[in-house]
Image (cartoon, rainbow, N blue to C red):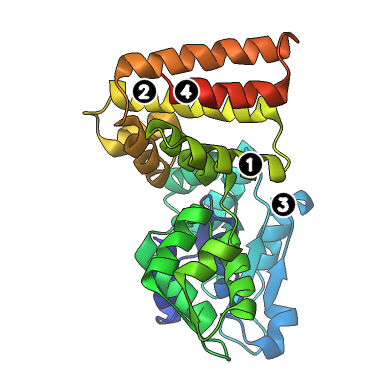
Amino acid sequence: MKYVELERHLQSAFEGFSPVYVIGGADAYLRQSACAMFKGIVSPEYADFNLSIISHGQGMSSVVDALSLYPVFDDVKVVVVPDVPDKISDQDKNLILSYAKEPNPQAILVLVGDTKSVTDFAKEGKLTYIDCGKLDENAIAIEVDKLLSVPPKKTIEKSALRALVEKTLGDMSRIVSEVTKLRSYSGDVITYQDVELMVAPDLEFAIYELTGAVSEKQAEKALEILDVFFKQGVRGHTLITMLYNQYRKMLHAELHKTDDAEALASMLEISSKALYHVRRVSKNYTQMRLKQAVDYLHGLQYSILSGKRLEHTAVHDAVLTLLNI
């Protein structure tokens, strides 16, 4: 089940609920929001009795014990484990799966974790999985509208929303933070200019912008973006590594440009949004030029680590060299 489907699902009759839900996915804000929706099922007046937050460290046997109790003056009891670890022990798995086979009909278990092992466990046990991966732009627009509907109500231009999504790479935690800031300093309508002025680009987005400017031979823009990195305290060696990783991804994107986008994104261990930017820039190069850039940056990394080059000057030289490859 996608995150965007959860609210409607929880508004349905209690009989339609699953005994165990697993909340996973990369977006921390969405995981917290999904967890809050489950907590909202319980009547606030009796939440002390019917809502239990139990750390994984307290033991899954404590969780199962809490689930066995019937709700007090309410129809449902919710037990949340907010910190499911990277690896779930076989003992814990067996406890959860055994409970799921014979659950308390008036209780819901909610497990929260952001790792692949949690996702795999949900599939293995045929548990209801809530996917809190990054939202697409339409879904983000709905979430932003909710944030802006709180009095004093405001709206956001489509171009401003698109810029906000790009600068934050669609991360809802950052979007919520930036929307809060934009509400305070913008007028009734948040404009594209507001976002450009007030929202600093995610470093990953900034590296896309830097390589894009370099690929299009826009030297002045490339140096301006480089200055953003330095103002944010990014070390020269870190920046060289980011450039190396980016050009390596671009080379793979060109070598596998006929491959399925989802498969390629998985191979490169990046999101589909990130793959879009990688491919957008890689199209400006031939495979030979990308190979030259990768080899050059790899050599420059070694020179910095071995003390043959200073970090700061190496970065400027790198950008100027890449402009001419």
Which structural element holds mark 3? helix
Q: Is disc 4 surrounded by few (<14), some (14 to 19) or many (20+) residues within 10 Å?
A: many
Q: Is disc 2 surrounded by few (<14), some (14 to 19) or many (20+) residues within 10 Å?
A: many
**Which quadrant does the N terminus fall into?**
bottom left
Q: Nearer the viewer, residue 121 or 90?
A: 121
> To which residue does mark 4 refer?
322
Sequence order check, earlier mark of 3 and 4: 3
Sequence order check, earlier mark of 1 and 2: 1
Disc 3 to disc 4, C-alpha distance: 49 Å
Asked if residue 87 is positioned above or below residue 192 in the image, the reply reads above
Which structural element holds mark 1? helix
Please state the horizontal and vertical placement of residue 60, each as a whole percent of the image.
69, 52
Name the image quarter holding residue 237. top right
Q: Nearer the viewer, residue 300 or 19?
A: 300
> To which residue does mark 2 refer?
252
> To which residue does mark 1 refer?
227
